[in-house]
Amino acid sequence: MIISKKTSAAPLPFAISHGTLIPMGFSSTLDDALSQSVEHAINMIAAMFEMPRQQVYLLLSAAIDFNVTQVVDITPKAFTV
């Protein structure tokens, strides 16, 4: 399920799969899409667990994994797991 409701308090876009929240990034370059995905993950985890963004960043530096879904399209897409 992909959440796209503009009134959502969570950073958009993100998906839900088997109870897992998956932050996504879309941009004109792959680097920007990946950066956007990380930013969404940091914001989501910081809000959910009331953690400082710097602490979340350190946590994600050891625990984050990326998947690139559409590089050849006009808008590259990436998501964080």
Image (cartoon, rainbow, N blue to C red):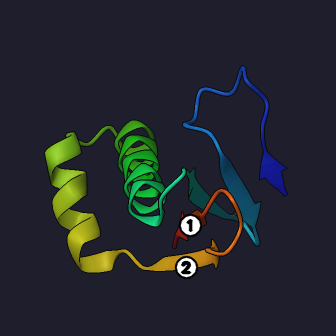
Quadrant position of residue 38: bottom left
Residue drawn at the location 55% of the way across and 79% of the way down: 67
Q: Which x, y percent locates residue 45?
A: 40, 49
Report whether 10 appears left or right of 62.
right
Say which quarter of the image contains residue 61: bottom left
Left or right of 66? Residue 64 is left
Q: Residue at x 26, y 43 (%)?
A: 51
Q: 42 left or right of 67?
A: left
Which of the 4 image quarters holds residue 78? bottom right
Badge number at residue 46: none
Q: CA distance from mark 2 to mark 1?
A: 6 Å
Q: Is residue 51 above or below residue 26?
A: above
Q: Residue at x 78, y 38 (%)?
A: 4
Q: Secondary structure at mark 2?
A: strand
**Where is mark 1, residue-wise?**
78
Percent position of residue 50, x then y:
32, 37
> Label 2 is placed on what type of residue?
Asn
x, y percent for residue 75: 65, 56
In the picture shown, does residue 42 fall above or below 18? Answer: above
| Residue nearest the observer in this picture, 23 or 67 | 67
In the picture of the structure, the residue carrying the numbered disc 2 is: 67
Q: Position of residue 68 (x, y in %)?
A: 57, 77
* Three-letter residue code for mark 1: Ala
| Residue 66 vertical placement versus 49 (above, below) | below
At x 72%, y 20%, the residue is 7
Between 42 and 76, the residue placed more toward the observer is 76
Q: Tell me the crowding category of disc 1: few under 14, some 14 to 19, or many 20 or more residues within 10 angstroms, Cα based.
A: many
Is 32 situated above or below 63?
Answer: above
Labels 2 & 1 near each other (Cβ < 8 A): yes
> How many numbered discs?
2
Seen from the viewer's position, the closer of residues 70 and 39 is: 70
Q: Is residue 38 left or right of residue 18?
A: left
